[in-house]
Amino acid sequence: MKSFFYTSSLLFLLACVALIPVSCDNDQLPEVEEPEFCDTLEVSYQLNIRPIVETYCAYSGCHDGSSPGVYLSYEGMLPNLNSGQVRERTVNTRDMPPSYANAGLEELPPAEFEMMQCWLEQGFPEQ
């Protein structure tokens, strides 16, 4: 009887181990491709990006002087734009805006994300 118990326990344990994935290859975001319309779209901070930044980045408690980077103006964003930090956090790792952001959004809506991506690809013009 003990032999049956040990054998069935061992088989059950082996079955459970077999179900555990050997490795995880989904721990990275898919590579971000530039939208095709970026070639023809003229994007600037003043025309397109400022409202996005005011809504999702530079609101009370975040990038308004109370956290790293003061995004209340183009000049305030420029150091983080030049260093690539805005692109890294917004486009590459997509962890901005954070889950506690204004309106509770955990990511930029698709249209705003693509607009931001085009603007960064075009060298983040102000006007």
Image (cartoon, helix red, strand yellow):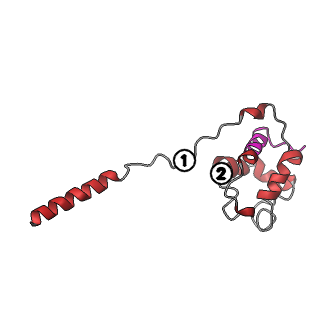
Looking at the image, tell me whether mark 1 or mark 2 is earlier in sequence order: 1
Instruction: Using residue 25 as the reference point, say whether residue 73 is left or right of it.
Output: right
Q: Is residue 77 above or below residue 61?
A: above
x, y percent for residue 114: 73, 43
Disc marking residue 94: 2
- Three-letter amino acid code at the position of disc 2: Arg
x, y percent for residue 24: 44, 49
Q: Quadrant of residue 41?
A: top right
Q: Is residue 115 magenta?
A: yes
Instruction: Using residue 11 as the reference point, say whether residue 116 is left or right of it.
Output: right
Q: Considering depth in this image, is 71 or 34 the residue closer to the camera?
A: 34
x, y percent for residue 23: 41, 48
For label 1, count other residues whose C-alpha is less than 10 Å away and answer few (under 14), some (14-19) or many (20+): few
Disc marking residue 53: none
Question: Whole-Å distance between the Cαs marked 1 and 2?
Answer: 11 Å
Q: Secondary structure at mark 1?
A: loop
Residue at 85% across, 59% down: 72
Residue of label 1: 28
Q: Quadrant of residue 118?
A: top right
- Three-letter amino acid code at the position of disc 1: Gln
Magenta stretch in the rendered image: 114-127
Residue at 30% across, 55% down: 17
Quarter of the image with the N terminus in it: bottom left
Q: Is residue 54 magenta?
A: no
Q: Considering depth in this image, is 60 or 105 the residue closer to the camera?
A: 105
Q: Quadrant of residue 103?
A: bottom right
x, y percent for residue 79: 79, 52
Residue at 69% across, 36% down: 34
Instruction: Using residue 52 as the reference point, say whether residue 84 is left or right of it.
Output: left
Instruction: Using residue 58 as the reference point, say whether residue 34 is left or right of it.
Output: left
Q: Secondary structure at mark 2?
A: loop
